[in-house]
Each structure stands twice: as C-alpha cells, then as structure tokens.
Image (spheres, rainbow, N blue to C red):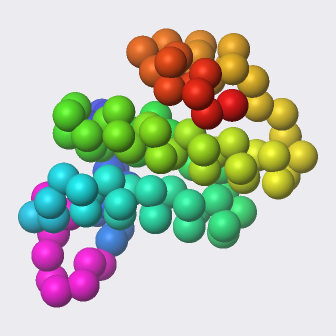
C-alpha cells in the first residue's frame, strides 16, 4: 500500500458485512475493477497505480489486464489520447499486456 494515502477499498461497504480482505482473490479483483469504473463514470480520472498498489502482488497482473481496457475506453470517450508509450512508461512491467490491449 502507498504511504500517505488511504486505500481505495477502505471506503467500501460490502454486502454481507465482509471486509475487502475477506474476499477471495477473484472477488478482490472484480471489486477493484468495479470501483475503478464507477470512479470514471462519476467524472473522476482514477489512477490504475493506486488500485494496483492496494492489491496483493499476486493479483496485480490480472487486475491490470482488466483496468487498462477500462482506462483506454473512458479516456477515448472523453476525447483524450492514449498511447502505448505513455502506458509503457507508467507500467514497463506490463508492456506485453499493453501491446495486446491498445
């Protein structure tokens, strides 16, 4: 988790009274993607970096594979450009995923 910033999942109220940490890994990724998309729909421009930082290391690649297409879609809808180079500079460890996405 990044220091000085509250994890995005601390604001959640999950069904059944579970905490985010009690969810299965698959559910954690799904919730992360849902919340990320909701932020875009509400007019924000959330950072993928924050979502990845708050997930367990083993879940980050899967989450990234789902978050990048969302970011691309919403940026295009807002008339903003997105390039391989920009994403590869932000996420060099995921350049193969990026090349398959955009």
Q: Is residue 69 magenta?
A: no
Q: Which percent across, then down, holds residue 53?
A: 33, 36
Q: From the viewer's side, name the closer residue of 55 and 58.
A: 58
Residue that extends furthest to the left in the rendered view of this protein: 22
Quarter holding the C terminus is: top right
Q: Which percent across, then down, holds residue 16?
A: 16, 86
- Residue 87 lies in quadrant: top right
- Residue 5 lies in quadrant: top left
The residues colored magenta run 13-21
Q: Which percent across, then down, holds residue 22?
A: 10, 64
Q: Residue at x 50, y 57 (%)?
A: 36
As drawn, 3 above or below 34 = above
As drawn, 83 above or below 5 = above
- Relative to 69, is 21 on the left or the right? left
Q: Is residue 5 at least partly visible in the picture?
A: no
Q: Residue at x 59, y 16 (%)?
A: 88
């Amino acid at each position: 988790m990044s220091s000085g910033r509250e994890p995005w999942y601390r604001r959640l109220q999950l069904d059944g009274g579970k905490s985010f940490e009690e969810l299965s890994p698959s559910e954690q990724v799904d919730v992360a993607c849902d919340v990320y998309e909701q932020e875009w729909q509400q007019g924000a421009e959330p950072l993928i970096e924050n979502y990845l930082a708050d997930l367990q290391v083993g879940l980050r690649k899967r989450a990234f594979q789902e978050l990048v297409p969302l970011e691309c879609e919403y940026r295009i809808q807002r008339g903003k450009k997105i390039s391989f180079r920009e994403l590869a500079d932000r996420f060099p460890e995921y350049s193969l995923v990026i090349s398959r996405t955009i």
